Amino acid sequence: GGLGNDYMSTASLNNCVFWENTDSGGFDETGQVWTEGGPVTFNHNCIQGWTGAMGGTGNTGQDPMFIDPAGPDAVPGTIDDNPKLSRGSSCINTGNDVAVPPDIFDLDGDGDTTELMPFDLAWQSRTVGDHVDMGAFEFQSPPGDFDLDGDVDQADFGRFQACLSGAGTIQSNPECLAALIDDDGDVDGDDTQLFLGCLSGPDIPVSPQCAG
């Protein structure tokens, strides 16, 4: 299983993802988190098989949509796994900001130890967008980055063009989420201008805030 908590322990879980862990019952809720008497609180977590029986707020059982949870070797739990979130994951912007710990060790060297933790597990920005994400890795990919390689280049532009719907025509193709840059449901000239503002070229990283 993913987490075990016995009667002598107390745990508070926030902004966590428990997925693809198993016990004798398979991949259900108890395969992810198991408790026997010890008090546990769950808030703003993504837990496979979530039933709601353990209470809390903001929890979900939706697939976190890891980029490649088993990696190229197709074996979960090895070094080539990529448990970062894909665009469209329900874990993006749905964490609890209050639960982010303070930067007591001043990891970014700015002298402020009361600010929220500035980095995720990959030493990238901990909060991108309106709220922190669930999980150890914050979704970092900029608008228009269809292939999730950190840049916005001609390969992305070709896919953006294929998603153009025109003003007022809703673009519902899930493959076009990266093209919905102004979040009004269509892909039109406004999105095109924002996309061009993010265009960086191959292998040139671009900020997730490139569209303003």
Image (cartoon, rainbow, N blue to C red):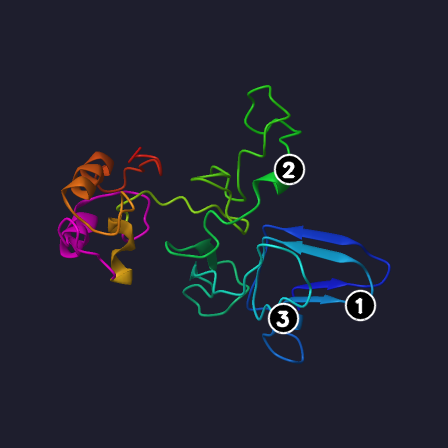
**In 3D space, how far apart are the residues under numbered discs 1 and 2 (Cα atoms)?**
27 Å
Q: Residue furthest bottom?
A: 25
| Rendered position, 109 above or below 167 | above
| Left or right: 137, with 31 as reference point | left
Position in image of residue 53 (x %, y %): 67, 68
Q: Which mark is residue 101?
A: 2
Q: Relative to 138, is 186 on the left or the right?
A: left
Residue identified by numbered label 1 = 36
Left or right: residue 86 versus residue 136 is left
Question: Is residue 180 on the magenta stretch?
Answer: no
Which residues, given as a range, are shown in magenta?
A: 146-172
Circles 3 and 1: CB distance less than 8 Å? no
Residue 52 falls in image quadrant: bottom right
Amino acid residing under circle 3: Glu
Disc 2: CA contacts within 10 A as few (<14), some (14-19) or many (>=20): few
**Residue sitting at x 15%, y 48%:** 167
| C-alpha gap between disc 2 and disc 3 | 26 Å
Per the image, the residue denoted by label 3 is 29
Q: What is the three-letter code of the residue carrying label 1?
A: Glu
